[in-house]
Amino acid sequence: MPRSPNESALPSRREIVHGAAVGAGALLIDGCHGGPPPAPVTPAALAPRPLPDGLEVRGTRFTKNGRAFFVSGINYWAGPTLARTGNAAGWDRVRRDLDGIQAAGLNMIRTMAATEGPDTAPQRIAPTIQPAPGQYDPAGVEGVLRFAEELQTRGLYGIYALSNFWQWSGGFAQYVAWADAALIPYPPPMPNGSWDRYQRFTSSFYKNAKAMELYDDYLKLLVPQLKSNPTVIWELANEPRGLGNTRAFHDWVDKTARLIKSLAPSQLCTTGSEGLTATPWYAGVDPVADHRSPAIDFICFHMWAENWGWVHGDSLPKGTPKALDLAKKYIERHAELAAELGKPLLLEEFGFPRDGGSFDPASPTTFRDRYFQEVYALVFSLLPTTPMAGIMPWAWGGDAHPPRPGGLWKPGDPFTGDPPHEKQGWYSIYDEDTTLKLIADWSPKISAPKNA
């Protein structure tokens, strides 16, 4: 299996990446707000300027070197954090995980390229890349770059989320808290937590000039350093929602995507949106309006059966048929909306609980496998005749098992497929799961469908 350059090359590459050597005692790189604004992006400037082996969008299809490209991928959010310099065990695990991902025939990974806030903040990936506003940990930045380089070496494509609507990587809420010197109103399981209060605080990001400036500063640091990597795809954030600020949300999507195109015109960009969700009127989402910007290349959507109340882990035998019926309608509706807009469509996240709602990695996945089988079959059937472009389940766990299945992540625990704010073992796909064999069986069919 191909490998990246050895670790002895990292200091010189990091010097080049950051423009100067990091002093022996330096822990953080200061960001800056200066410099001229990006040049306006015209429709002509948004036209693809392909990199060799890079992905383009032509109509409702991804293409690679002029041929249709279909995605059989998986979410692996922890990769860049594990790849940070100084974490030899983490880097070993990254390469082991990528070996397993490639063995399953997968061709794309979706990951988290930004983490914000102090490592002591609750429900948070740690260590973070940006522990303080405008200050970046060189080891964390290098982790993103090293991970991207490894994917390129292996010929794997990567979707890199640049922030998060949810608290588990800091995200918009952390930027707002920094900008306003405010406390984040964390949702459950924090005491007196409220999901509504948290979301309304977070969605104020789109009207907070200082918070958006801090976000843009990180984007300006990272994107230019990867603009020549043909395997990189940019994502504005994980699951951004308008929620009470819809017009400002759409303005932010367009402005930010155009900024990315001004910095990396050869790379694709998407929103990271969930799509319709279970309650689009509350979440402030609209797959057509949210992806209308000419700087957004394709539509993404997510699908969460248990989170949205389609099924409950303790009654899977009874609830799975209903969940499958709703999933079918949900997927087909997004295919219709993508055809209306005329852009490719990617099912970017979906998951299903283990039998009995168990969090134990040793528990069976009978109903998960049934659900996955039918979702994969439906996506496959839509590839030839709709804008459907691929599928990416949530999330790779590999050989990393939670020390307390069903508990929350704590510093020192291994990263699984479940983010720190969720019960560990909920949606992780482990290397011994029958689910992974099912994915591996579908991958060659998805990535090379006939008549598509």
Image (spheres, helix red, strand yellow):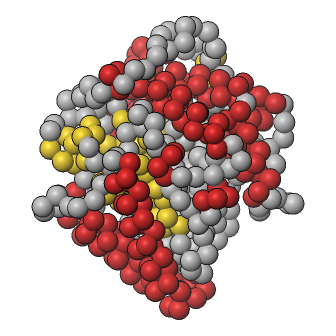
Residue in the image at 84% along x and 41% along y: 183
- In percent of width and height, residue 332 lies at 38, 67
Q: Is residue 205 left or right of residue 293?
A: right
On-image quarter of the C terminus: bottom left
Residue in the image at 53% along x and 67% along y: 304
Q: Is residue 171 visible?
A: no
- In percent of width and height, residue 308 lies at 60, 70
Q: Is residue 103 above or below residue 22?
A: below
Closest to the observer, 310 or 51: 310
Q: Is residue 311 above or below residue 98?
A: below
Q: Is residue 175 above or below residue 321?
A: above
> Residue pushed farthest right?
192
Q: Is residue 7 above or below residue 311?
A: above
- In percent of width and height, residue 36 lies at 55, 8
> Residue pushed farthest front?
340
Q: Is residue 152 left or right of residue 211?
A: left
Closest to the observer, 67 or 290: 290
Residue in the image at 26% along x and 25% along y: 49
